[in-house]
Image (cartoon, helix red, strand yellow):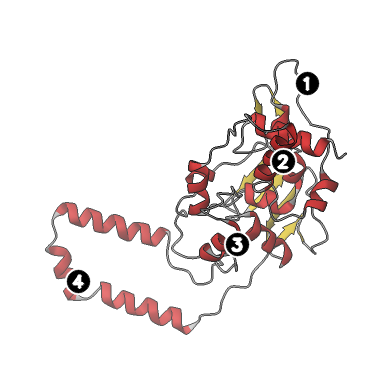
Amino acid sequence: MRHTSTCPYDGDRERKLTTSLHRQKLRQSWNKYNLFNIAKANLRQGRHGRTFFQQKWAAKSMTRGYHGAHIKETDWNRAFSRRLFSAPIHEMTPYMQMAYAPLERRLDVAIFRAMFASSTLQAKQFCTHGAVKVNGKPLDGTQVEAVPAEAGQQAEQQPKQSGHKEKAATEAITDLVSSKEVRKQVDGLSRDEQKALANLLRQDAENPIDESKPYWTPWEPRRYMAPFAFVPRYLEVNQNICAAVYLRHPVARRGTAEVPTPFPYETNQLAFNWYLRRH
């Protein structure tokens, strides 16, 4: 599994395809427009003047825009299950928050949850173009769902052969830093300014520009990703080697459900009832 900046689903294109400030459909994406829609969304729809069918239809339309928007409705109907997994407890449990639990088993959704992709669309591109390995074997595109205890990681990539260009650039930087003019300018700085300069040079040495990496360098956290920066309990992620393990299927526990969703209990309950009648 890997996160790359060369995916065709860039910011503007993804906003045009999936994110609308007018319709305000919520998506599984780190897009800033999607974050705005989540912040402004009125998720508790009023039931006054609506029939039960209309309430279920509105809830289904709202939740499907977020859970598996890149999946056909027929595929989701085939994957839907009325069986909701939960821990063996006898207290109040939000079972209806598990309505879309079968989608969390998909590899593209697991990659998005592991924070290796900025959206499920980008994660689907990784799976389609062979950028993901499952249990050490390249993904051939036929496997859709993850199996508990399966490990996924980024595919091997040959580093770019820059050769003499990198060597010339390194020599030029070394000559520039060691020049007398630079030393004079540094000597003219105050102690606080020298400390700030030393800190910047230290950070640049720890996170240098490396064109051989499959992502933009120097690396820095993506903007607007903080609200989405969490890993569910059913995943074990190692960001250092860009790998994750799908431990088990998500379950409902006392007072909480392991399927991340921005929608309240009542909305997911209506959506579950919509699909329940068709199975």
Please say whether residue 184 is visible from this viewpoint: yes
Above or below for 90 versus 147: above
The mark closer to the camera, 4 or 3, is: 3
- Please tell me which of labels 2 and 1 falls first in the chain: 2
- Please tell me which of labels 2 and 3 falls first in the chain: 3
Residue 218 image position (x, y, % from top left): 43, 63
Residue 123 image position (x, y, % from top left): 66, 58
Residues at circles 4 and 3 in contact by the CB criterion of under 8 Å: no
Residues at circles 4 and 2 in contact by the CB criterion of under 8 Å: no
Residue appearing at x 70%, y 56% in the figure: 70
- Please tell me which of labels 4 and 3 falls first in the chain: 3
Q: What is the C-alpha distance between the residues marked 2 and 3?
A: 23 Å
Q: What is the C-alpha distance between the residues marked 2 and 1?
A: 32 Å
Above or below for 225 versus 53: below
Residue wearing tag 4: 182
- Rendering quarter of residue 201: bottom left
- Please tell me which of labels 1 and 3 falls first in the chain: 3
Q: Amino acid at mark 1?
A: Pro
Residues at circles 2 and 3 in contact by the CB criterion of under 8 Å: no
> Judging from the image, what secondary structure is the residue with disc 3 in?
helix
**Crowding near pointer 4: few (<14 within 10 Å), some, many (20+)?**
few
Residue appearing at x 78%, y 49% in the figure: 146
Residue wearing tag 1: 88
Nearer to the camera, 49 or 85: 49
Residue wearing tag 2: 57
> Judging from the image, what secondary structure is the residue with disc 2 in?
helix
The mark closer to the camera, 1 or 3, is: 3
Residue wearing tag 3: 17
Residues at circles 1 and 3 in contact by the CB criterion of under 8 Å: no
- Please tell me which of labels 4 and 2 falls first in the chain: 2
Nearer to the camera, 216 or 163: 216
Residue 165 image position (x, y, % from top left): 45, 82
